[in-house]
Image (cartoon, coloured by chain):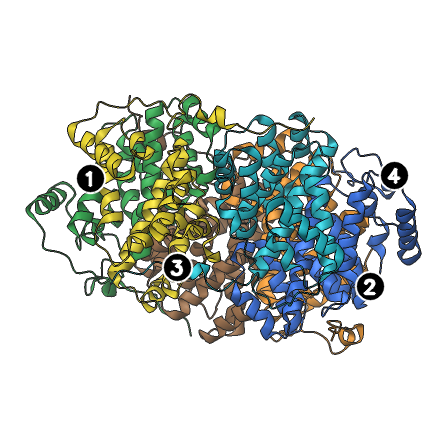
Chain colours: A yellow, B cyan, C blue, D green, E orange, F brown
Amino acid sequence: MPAKPARTKAAAAAPAEALTALDLPPAPLDAETEAFFQKCRDKIGFVPNVLLAYTHDLAKLKAFSAMYNDLMLAPSGLSKLEREMIAVAVSAVNRCYYCLTAHGATVRQLSGDPELGEMLVMNYRAARLDTRQRAMLDFAVKLTEAPWTVDEPDREALRSAGFSDRDIWDISATAAFYNMSNRMASATDMRPNAAYHGLAR
Amino acid sequence: MPAKPARTKAAAAAPAEALTALDLPPAPLDAETEAFFQKCRDKIGFVPNVLLAYTHDLAKLKAFSAMYNDLMLAPSGLSKLEREMIAVAVSAVNRCYYCLTAHGATVRQLSGDPELGEMLVMNYRAARLDTRQRAMLDFAVKLTEAPWTVDEPDREALRSAGFSDRDIWDISATAAFYNMSNRMASATDMRPNAAYHGLAR
Amino acid sequence: MPAKPARTKAAAAAPAEALTALDLPPAPLDAETEAFFQKCRDKIGFVPNVLLAYTHDLAKLKAFSAMYNDLMLAPSGLSKLEREMIAVAVSAVNRCYYCLTAHGATVRQLSGDPELGEMLVMNYRAARLDTRQRAMLDFAVKLTEAPWTVDEPDREALRSAGFSDRDIWDISATAAFYNMSNRMASATDMRPNAAYHGLAR
Amino acid sequence: MPAKPARTKAAAAAPAEALTALDLPPAPLDAETEAFFQKCRDKIGFVPNVLLAYTHDLAKLKAFSAMYNDLMLAPSGLSKLEREMIAVAVSAVNRCYYCLTAHGATVRQLSGDPELGEMLVMNYRAARLDTRQRAMLDFAVKLTEAPWTVDEPDREALRSAGFSDRDIWDISATAAFYNMSNRMASATDMRPNAAYHGLAR
Amino acid sequence: MPAKPARTKAAAAAPAEALTALDLPPAPLDAETEAFFQKCRDKIGFVPNVLLAYTHDLAKLKAFSAMYNDLMLAPSGLSKLEREMIAVAVSAVNRCYYCLTAHGATVRQLSGDPELGEMLVMNYRAARLDTRQRAMLDFAVKLTEAPWTVDEPDREALRSAGFSDRDIWDISATAAFYNMSNRMASATDMRPNAAYHGLAR
Amino acid sequence: MPAKPARTKAAAAAPAEALTALDLPPAPLDAETEAFFQKCRDKIGFVPNVLLAYTHDLAKLKAFSAMYNDLMLAPSGLSKLEREMIAVAVSAVNRCYYCLTAHGATVRQLSGDPELGEMLVMNYRAARLDTRQRAMLDFAVKLTEAPWTVDEPDREALRSAGFSDRDIWDISATAAFYNMSNRMASATDMRPNAAYHGLAR
């Protein structure tokens, strides 16, 4: 007897799936958090599940959000798209379902190139990148896979590709951050918002 | 100066991208191949690029197609969706852009569950699979990553999950086939048909 | 008390060992298959066990044989020995007992150099190969170990060693095929014909 | 001729070594940062180099410090020593010179057991840990080495060892944070304060 | 144009191949060494190349031989065949051409089972071993691949399979010794005596 | 409830910890061994536990000591410190608690540079080594991690860094020896003398 499909849309639509595998009741939101979440809803239509997952402890939510916002949105020699490209390439090494879904969507959106998002999820080496961006992702991936082998020649390769020392900090900080975030998502089985899947296809 | 997006839709749409990185002019198609390709167009709207990539030698094309068709379409204790699920889980280990794109689309289509396709591309362990399908993919992935360690307890685990010895052959043959196909695609930098990307989202 | 030898020749000679760990009764052979098997007996003295292992389903046997024969015997820029060398080097990475036994024997036979066969089984880097053949095996082994990292510089290295784009296809197809075959043998615990062991020593 | 010692104490004492391999001039410190640094000097006698390395951008310094302080010092089901033990076990996988030096010293200090600090740096499996702490470090190390394989049985193992779901969050967050920090240190060749080496031996 | 065989028997028979890739002239042999080498010639027909490779420094030759002879020939709860089986299984992990050739031959000889020798070279998991010998090789291989993960449960598994603590020492010492020897052979490109290849086939 | 420290100094000071996890009663020491152990006590203040661990069989103790003494103390193009540096870099790859503790202490002592000892334990790439010593450790580490890939270009790199063929033998022999020793220590859970921890800090 042939097997049945793993899940049907009906099943998927049914009772709300838990955000994570941990039973951590949310704390009451303070005004600052309410305002932040409202800003999310205004801007992207929903509050990313990663933020909801942190609501069990507002101090942790604020620390995480502050670092995230500085890293991904503050002025930098790296474009916002480039920072998202690093997020996806790193998350692909770590096979992180949450981050690949969320940041894959953002790459599709910011680049206007859905295939680029797909390629970074699947294998960034398949993407037709210019020398600069290829060097950037090569560094981020090496730093993810074997940080203990990163050495001066790796930094020199970035400088040769046109990056400043501050850019190297920013590439490193972005790659490093997703090595943290990927592990929080995997450790807790964090589930991405369904809205990401259809975004900017 | 912030970097520019890696590629724009305009650029992507421009002159037809090469099928592979190898310069292998197609042979003239014989009637049998023409008919086969027409059947592809009728059924899915296009000829998969992997078939076009083999047209430089029709004997190879026919051998590949015969094996593919038997494996993926012939009667089996595994549903067609399950065979596609194996294709994607194996291709994810091998990070094969072509196969993840093509078979990821087929999983979305056959399951009616786009998220399932995404999860298998990203990390099959994130999918909510029943015991049978989880055992099936665990075996396929182990066979992909470290075939030399596969031993009787691994076959027993499949039998315990309800698979017959013939099913074990079919799971193995499917996983093994994509270990071949993934490597042909990576070795030649094979590019998937653009049509797959938007399919069944 | 000293341990006893693991197995004696007497034991090994006793009741015929199963071809594989799967209980899959052979289908009745059709005339085409009978003729093919007779040709094997005439040419090498026996029917390779891998073919017998496929007799539970003649469609699968024919698809496998057609691809095998095209790959290993059809005209190519690679000599038959070179294709067998790839088979052994790939099977060594995957530690496949069946394929190392069968194709190790063929390398010994075609090369008239038993040590070459041994070296490819044990570590191809120990063999005194010319630049062309070393480049060929380096590519095949990289494609086996980490297909996702194969990129244009790897193809360029083959071209520099004198290979045409068609040769690159053939190297890739051979390496890819044994990545499939190795996994079928490991998944099913396929046992090689005893005759291979003493061949061309 | 025998080689000379790699470096002498004199050499090491000479001109101040750079904090990192990146040329990033510090920003002028604001009052809040001055106060924070003064608190460090009062408490441990010096400002940890990791903080100085972030002074090129005070927003990043504050985001990093806020997360660090919450993680390592806020109330938790994990003792401060246990959080430091995770820091060292994770940093050992990533072979991070900065973090092993700094947090190895803290483990020596908080535990009053210098050998424990050494064992966690070298191989945490050599330490005589109780079931609870061994489970904690096994989880942290698996999450570091292969986050994509962490699954419900891993969380169950922590629960069986007596950890609450909130504790699991805290173990994960600590392990994840050092996967970030280790990569910042390796990417930038961050050098630890010399004071750590002799601490609590 | 098809490639030519990599080497012919004629070529192989030609001028004596160097023992290793290092240019280390042998020291004049003292009487003790002469007697030892004569004993080798009497017993196995030739002096193993590994011993010749050490003749550049007789102190090192004697230390190596003393350890080798105690380990492989002194009374032990492990039979001589079992010690040779460990030698081959370890050398297979390390893909050591010299040791696989020499000790593969000895396993064929001592067991009277040529296929057993082949299986240990190719993949020890393919051999039909009893529980005791499988446990012995599983331990030796784990100790070779990831010594830092060997822990009390691994020793307990050996005890359950019937090994005494002294046997565990001997298994460990044999596996450890070939981890040394394999590396000397690989580091120096040591070539085995041609006589091994045809032995006990 | 916060966890208690894993162990207290009191506990550590209590009844003498077993040398290894194996129950192997020491043989009565002969005069030669007594003299050797007295020499150890005179020179370094104690008998290294590794020697005590071998006292269950004096033949093995003597073979081990003879090889050790020749390797680490005989004249060589490598200084004693350099041989100890190799010991530590290799033991760091294998995460061997015993050898890192004992030889880490010796590096601190011989170099007069405690930080150098720490860096070699944690990540030798963090140490500011000259070209010669970096090449030496790169070779030793590659030989440890993947001996089957060591080939002529690796030996050439050592020659370019100023090493003679005899030096290459000595580097290889030292790295190979600790690949043996690390595995004996891990297989038996060998515990280092407490005295090492505080040495030359």
Using the image, determine if residue C102 lies above or below residue D114: below
Query: Left or right: C50 with respect to A125?
Result: right
Single out the mark in the foreground, 3 or 4: 3
Which element is circle 1 on?
helix
**Which amino acid, mark 1?**
Ala
The spot of residue A27 in percent (x, y) is 24, 23
The answer for which chain carries disc 2 is C
User: Distance of mark 3 from mark 4, alpha carbons?
Assistant: 62 Å
Residue F76 as seen in the image, left or right of residue E2: left
For this view, does F144 lie left or right of residue A56? right
Same chain, labels 3 and 2: no
Discs 3 and 4 lie in a common subunit: no
The CA span between labels 3 and 2 is: 53 Å
**Amino acid tagged 3:** Arg
Q: Position of residue C197 (x, y in %)?
A: 82, 53
Give the labeled residue for mark 2: C109
**Chain letter of disc 3 in the image:** B
User: In the picture, residue F106 is in which quadrant?
Assistant: bottom left
Kindly report which numbered mark, 1 or 4, lies closer to the viewer in this rendering: 1
Look at the numbered discs 3 and 2 and tell me whether their residues touch, using CB distance below 8 Å: no
Q: Which residue is mark 1?
A: D66
Q: Which of C200/C142 is in front?
A: C142
- Mark-to-mark CA distance, 2 and 4: 26 Å
Residue indicated by mark 4? C16
Q: Position of residue A26 (x, y in %)?
A: 28, 23
- The residue tagged 3 is B7
| Inter-mark Cα distance, 1 to 4 | 71 Å
Q: Nearer the viewer, mark 3 or mark 1?
A: 3
Amino acid of disc 4: Ala
* Amino acid tagged 2: Gln
